Amino acid sequence: MSQIFHPSTNTISRVTIFGSLFIIAGLVWVVAQVNRSPYVTQANVAREQPVQFSHKHHVGDEGIDCRYCHTSVEVSAFAGIPPTKTCMNCHAQIFANSPYLEPVRESWRTGKPIQWTRVHDLPDFVYFNHSIHVNKGIGCATCHGRVDLMPLTWQVASLQMEWCLDCHRQPEKFLRPRDQIFNMAWQSPPSQIEEGRKLIKEYGIQSAAQLTSCSTCHR
Amino acid sequence: MREIGSDPLSEKPRGVACSGPDSAGSVHDIDWLRRQLEKSQGRQFWRSLEEIADTRYFQEFLKREFPDQASEWHDPVSRRNFLKLMGASLSLAGLTSCTRQPKETILPYVRQPEEIIPGKPLFFATAMPLSGVATGLLVESHEGRPTKIEGNPEHPASLGATDVFCQASVLSLYDPDRSQTLTYLGDICPWSAFWGAISVIVERQQARQGAGLRILTETVTSPTLASQIRGLLARFPEARWHQYEPASRDNVRAGARLAFGEAVNTTYHLDKAKVIVSLGSDFLASGPGCLRYAHDFADRRRLGADKREMNRLYVVESAVSSTGSVADHRMPLRASEIADFARALGSRLGIAPLRSGLQNASPVLGPSYAAWIDGAVRDLRSHRGASLVIAGDHQPPEVHALAHAINQVLENVGSTVVYTEPMEFNPVDETESLRGLVRDMDAALVDLLLIVGGNPVYNAPADLAFAEKMGKVGLCIHLSLYDDETSQLCHWHIPEAHYLESWSDARAFDGTVSIIQPLIAPLYRGKTAHELLAAFSSQPERSCYDLVRDYWKSQQKTGDFEEFWRRALHDGFIANSALPQRSVSMKAPVVSSRPLESSDGPGTMDRESSGLEIVFQPDPAIYDGQFANNGWLQELPKPLTKLTWDNAALVSPATAEKLGLRYREGGSGGEAYADVVELKYLGRTTTAPIWILPGHANDSVTVHLGYGRWRAGKVAAGTGFNAYALRTSRHPWFSMGLEIRKTSETFPLATTQLHHHLEGRDLIRSASLEEYHRDPEFAQPTEHPPSMAPSLYPEHKYEGYAWGMAIDQSSCIGCNACVVACVSENNIPVVGKSEVLRGREMHWLRIDTYHKGGLDNPETFYQPMLCQHCEKAPCEVVCPVAATVHSAEGLNDMVYNRCVGTKYCSNNCPYKVRRFNFFLYSDWETSSLKMMRNPDVTVRSRGVMEKCSFCVQRINHAKIEAEKENRHVRDGEIVTACQATCPTRAIVFGNINDPNSQVSKLKADPRNYSVLGELNTRPRTTYLAVVRNPNPEMG
């Protein structure tokens, strides 16, 4: 009886078995990359907004402090989105007839809020608190990037848990002095790790074990 | 697997594991149960009749934590099935992860209110009126949405605690079944039509001086409402005001009139009482002031390093109440025998009996009670001025008069008993008041009936035939939260504003006035009683805010009104508004031997009639029926019976035996199939399932009011039987003459008594005060001390905070407030009766109830059971996906988004405190319910395990606030939801690494022990053993 399989089948089968390991590993890698990609995380994607609000103009050019609009960032979990009143403080006078600002004026007239699209959207089972971060030496730009350079706002970080843990495991890598929190242009010094360790002591920042306990963020 | 609803009695028990006879398969052979109890000397405590019977069903139920689910895998799993399921779950699990977050919008304010910081809750003081009586509250508000009710620590009736009704009232506010529109003859109407109609009516009535106008309210303690009604009666002199409340305190008021010839309000100072005798009174858990009483009672009882004495409580009652269950001496007596007991007590204390012919009251009670009375009398006598006799609200006036007389003889008046002016504005006999109204209705004298709150068509005494007489009324206007039974028969139905939507005021048990301020604008444009009555005044369209404020402005003659008003709103009550103490003089006849009244008076009973006694009581969960559509309360396991979603006719074991009644548990999850009986009383009948309550008085049947509603909403639909159908105006609370006929039917009752059973281990430890004095360390285990041997798991040193809890079981009265508080705080879903029948209720905190002693009058012990946060948690090591892990501060964290629902953790939990979402129990659709949820706690989806988190959201909040101020969390800064609401302060939470914290001190108490400590799980929740203070002379 003749052979069913050609001798070359031996080689093919070996290559297939050996190769499938690579293929599976490759697939896993692809899935992991897709999962971290802006397609999934929406990082670096500028969002359409009802008003073409430019942080670049307001923060970068005009030099308005973050807290003028995000008033509750130091005291509350939620940094606060400014009420229409805050916009109208200036825009009742400046660009008062600009067509771009019609949605703002409309909201002011009708009493209906402007519907902003959320840029930084954490899953609902994550409980992030702005106030504790800005009070303990995490600058706005650490997570939100150079907002003063963004015409339309996008998120710079993936906001995935590995990204959160990167800091919660080693806060010294990112801490800055409290007086630099709202400084968009602050650069970490070369001695960041030592400086950061000093700030950990000074600000009484919790241990990594506490910061990485699940219930710190999930409840 | 058997079908739910089939009768397990039809199955022959096979392979019964216990030594009992075949009939041991059910809880009906009471005699056999008794013998079992006597035999089992090793085991002191028991939880249910089923446990003693130890039937096949019960054992099966024990073996499988979630029996229904477990049986699905009883078929041999074929390889093919296995692969199919694995493949399907893999691909489905993979698919679900391929979603992107949906786009979300943020809607900021247009003009942000000054006080609101988004993300930070505000607290406002207000008060909840129940039967007219206020409890002071602080309500948490998130961006204008009230989400959680807390007690007002400064309010005399609350002291920071609340009861189940207050806790659950926030669900009533958001109830989607609330009436949302004004209707005329069932059709939706614009408000303008109503105001137009009213103005015509007012004109017509004005011409007749209001001769055809009748106003029916519930009990009124609101000064503003009372002044409005007075004004209205002045405008319409011929109009009449009637009050009716199904759970009225007529007898209390009549008792005061009998004793003093005038209506007075009685309040008690339990902080000064060393010996208390309750004559059928559940003063710890129901009635005005119960929260305060429970607090003072527990304070007086709390043992500690420097406090070694306790008060002593004697209780006589028919059904077991919260008060009776924590008594040092409890005697089951039929409600109608309590008067005899009171007379006997009175005569022993030197008060001549009230009625001739009853001098020898003791024989009625039987010789065995003589010793009991002796002991109580000696104790009362030796504590003159520091003793207290409290008559139950439902006891006849005579018993109240006797209690007043006894307190006077014992010199308690002024110390433990205080009399004030009545808190009601018109303390009438409400049953008589309603009778008068019905008489007028029958005579067609009523052109216009204004029903302001209440639901008389459903809850009026059956003999008055209120519904029938409604047909003879010209025009009926009904103001009510729900479009209910009464609304259906009224012409106009006006949606009422919930108390959290209204401006109003009300008095507390001691007369303290609270201004009720709204937390939210009326969701459905509801109106308050004030606004409805204003429509009949000269200024018809005034808001309730103006009405309440103007009333108080008119009362405030001196000082700055604005300051007074702001202070009253801020504090939640008007300072020094408690009614002043007043002296009363006993009417001579009370202490004479002249017969006082015929037995025809309301509330007295016919001694002549024999047979069974029927006792009506407001339901401990849904009260008089007004909370029937509240899922939290419907699903709340009632104290002692642990019944949910239904009421039952409660009988004693001996009576059940005599009547051949029984129930037996089914196999699927602890449902009980109860015999259905026909209750016949004064020619009216209803059918009801029975429930055997150990400790209930013999020959007496207790039925709870509030169920069997036919127009109440989706939640209330089909629950329980209507006990009002049997209730008469002559005997609203109890009477003899009940006939019971057993039917052939059985009815499945959802009881949680059997759920999460901890299999008779050494869980409860108790001692008498004497034993405690001899050996304060009695609770420390001798048989199985927790082993300190090295654990297989690595040791961990907790630096910084280490959260822990201590629960003083001596203080727990089983009132359930903590359970509802937990539900409200942690967004715990309601699962419904069919799921409770399968043992799937989601409560993170349950009150385990244990009994000790015989079936006829066992002692009762409560053990609030929640996640113990074991340092060596058995649940953590079995989780394949690390969804339950330990935090650095010793919390047993549950990570919902990791959980894949293997349920291994709950299988491995020795305390059975983990709950699994078999389905999507949380309502994700109804928008009003979304507003109610606590935004700080995840709303869980299906397939996820959950359990007590020690209110980790509150821990984190306090920690963040402390860290922002660069300090440590102070002791007492973190208060868990259960702890905050507990009237007796039985629960204490804190940092056990701080030796000076309150919780550390409690844990250092010799009574402190760990449940199942021998398992070496090192629970962070520990319990303080129960100490009772029985009279040593009574053996």
Image (tube, rainbow, N blue to C red):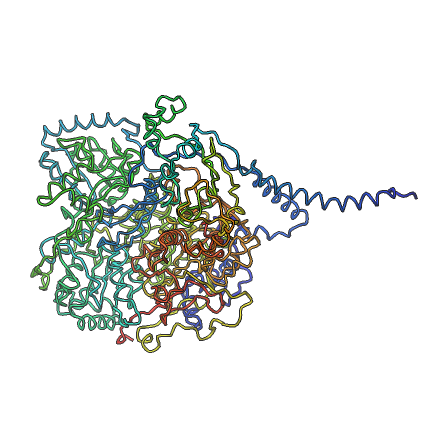
Residue depicted at x 10% and y 64% = B591
| Quarter of the image that includes the N terminus of chain A | top right
Nearer to us in this view, B975 or B111: B111
Nearer to us in this view, B26 or B633: B633
Nearer to us in this view, B874 or B448: B874
Query: B934 above or below B158?
Result: above
Q: Residue furthest right?
A: A1
Q: Residue furthest bottom?
A: B774
Residue B213 image point, x, y percent: 15, 34
- In this rendering, the count of numbered labels is 0
Residue depicted at x 83% and y 44% = A11
Query: B692 above or below B931?
Result: below
- Left or right: B828 in relation to B481: right
Q: Quadrant of residue B420?
A: bottom left
- Left or right: A179 in relation to B357: right
Q: Residue furthest front?
A: A190
Q: State whether residue B796 appears in this view.
A: yes
Query: B86 above or below B315?
Result: above
Residue B468 image point, x, y percent: 24, 37
Q: State whether residue B745 appears in this view.
A: no
Residue B230 image point, x, y percent: 11, 39
Residue B571 image point, x, y percent: 22, 49
Nearer to us in this view, B683 or B269: B269
